């Protein structure tokens, strides 16, 4: 009889352990990443050499270790809006509040002149990373000669900033550029003593592919210095890719760019000088020059942190 009782107790202990580990493995915190529906999924970890931070990307969302942010693109189960679920950033823009301007300092929109307006921005409720909308920026075919048109959302930030981090979901276009044509999607601007604003950091599509251009302030503080051009990863056309850019201003500074968790640029010691008393701003959208092509890109779930 005593032996029978011991066998029953052992069976109960084994069964309890199996149930416990099954619950632990399916717990949202058990894998380091969860989807918007509360199920676990495979994850990929990315890092930034300049900050030592990382991001954990899952099939339906992203968790940023540096900012503690979570994005869900499944839109199921009554999940919170992206920005409601991700407080505490300098700016969060999920374009779900029926306005493209919410949180931004200004919009840089070309009037077009004689050429007409060929670059525009609008909310898109049919294509997004998280519902119900994203920012769509569109260019139409045109020959602008050597001029440019833009439609960008701008965030001004303090002159004393030492760097910034920006994350966003981005859907590219399949347009093919030729010659000196370029379409910029992300820029960080510096305005030196002479008042002439230039692109300290520019990310976009050129005839040779995606590039990250770094142009520091000249040694005399009067304008742009010598640029450095770095080839960057190519986001998928028609589907959203997660893009992360981390910058440290100064000489030496640093620039780390990842696309879908893959480090495509890791410049750990570059000149990114823009004096602390000079105005700075970051913008997303489109600045298109020379030969424009039909192209629509989308931005969603933008997070900006100024350091």
Image (cartoon, rainbow, N blue to C red):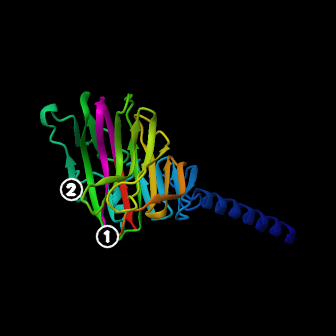
Which of the two residues, 147 or 49, is positioned nearer the viewer here?
147
Decide: is 272 above or below 293: below
Within-10-Å neighbours for mark 2: few <14, some 14–19, many 20+: some
Residue 182 in the magenta stretch? The answer is no
Mark number displayed over residue 62: none
Image quarter (top left, top right, bottom left or bottom right) of the C terminus: bottom left
Magenta-drawn segment? 278-299
Query: In this image, 124 relative to 237: left or right?
Result: left
Residue to which mark 2 is pinned: 106
Q: Quadrant of residue 92?
A: bottom left
Query: In this image, 232 relative to 202: left or right?
Result: right
Mark number displayed over residue 277: 1
Magenta span: helix, strand or loop, mainly?
A: strand
Estimate the spatial distance between the alpha carbons at disc 1 and disc 2, rounded to whole Å. 21 Å
Label 1 secondary element: loop
Q: Please state the horizontal and vertical placement of residue 41, each as a whole percent of the image.
A: 55, 50
Q: Please state the horizontal and vertical placement of residue 69, each as a whole percent of the image.
A: 43, 61
Within-10-Å neighbours for mark 1: few <14, some 14–19, many 20+: few
Q: Quadrant of residue 2?
A: bottom right
State the residue at coordinates (55%, 62%).
29
């Amino acid at each position: 009889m005593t032996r029978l009782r011991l066998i029953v107790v052992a069976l109960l202990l084994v069964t309890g352990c199996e149930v416990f580990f099954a619950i632990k493995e399916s717990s949202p915190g058990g894998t380091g990443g969860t989807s918007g529906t509360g199920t676990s999924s495979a994850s990929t970890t990315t890092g930034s050499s300049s900050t030592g931070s990382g991001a954990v990307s899952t099939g339906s969302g992203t968790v940023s270790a540096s900012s503690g942010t979570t994005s869900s693109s499944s839109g199921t189960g009554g999940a919170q809006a992206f920005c409601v679920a991700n407080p505490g950033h300098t700016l969060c823009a999920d374009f779900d509040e029926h306005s493209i301007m919410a949180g931004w300092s200004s919009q840089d929109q070309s009037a077009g002149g004689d050429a007409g307006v060929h670059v525009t921005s609008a909310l898109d409720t049919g294509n997004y990373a998280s519902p119900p909308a994203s920012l769509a920026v569109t260019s139409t075919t045109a020959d602008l000669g050597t001029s440019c048109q833009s439609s960008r959302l701008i965030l001004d930030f303090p002159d004393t900033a030492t760097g910034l981090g920006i994350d966003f979901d981005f859907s590219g276009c399949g347009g093919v550029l030729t010659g000196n044509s370029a379409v910029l999607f992300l820029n960080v601007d510096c305005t030196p003593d002479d008042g002439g604003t230039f692109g300290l950091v520019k990310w976009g599509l050129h005839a040779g592919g995606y590039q990250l251009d770094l142009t520091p302030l000249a040694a005399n503080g009067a304008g742009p210095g010598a640029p450095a051009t770095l080839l960057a990863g190519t986001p998928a056309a028609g589907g959203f890719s997660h893009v992360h850019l981390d910058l440290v201003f100064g000489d030496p500074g640093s620039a780390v760019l990842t696309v879908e968790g893959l480090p495509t640029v890791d410049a750990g010691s570059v000149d990114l000088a823009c004096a602390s008393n000079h105005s700075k701003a970051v913008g997303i959208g489109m600045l298109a020059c020379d030969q424009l092509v039909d192209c629509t890109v989308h931005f969603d779930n933008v997070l900006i942190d100024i350091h």
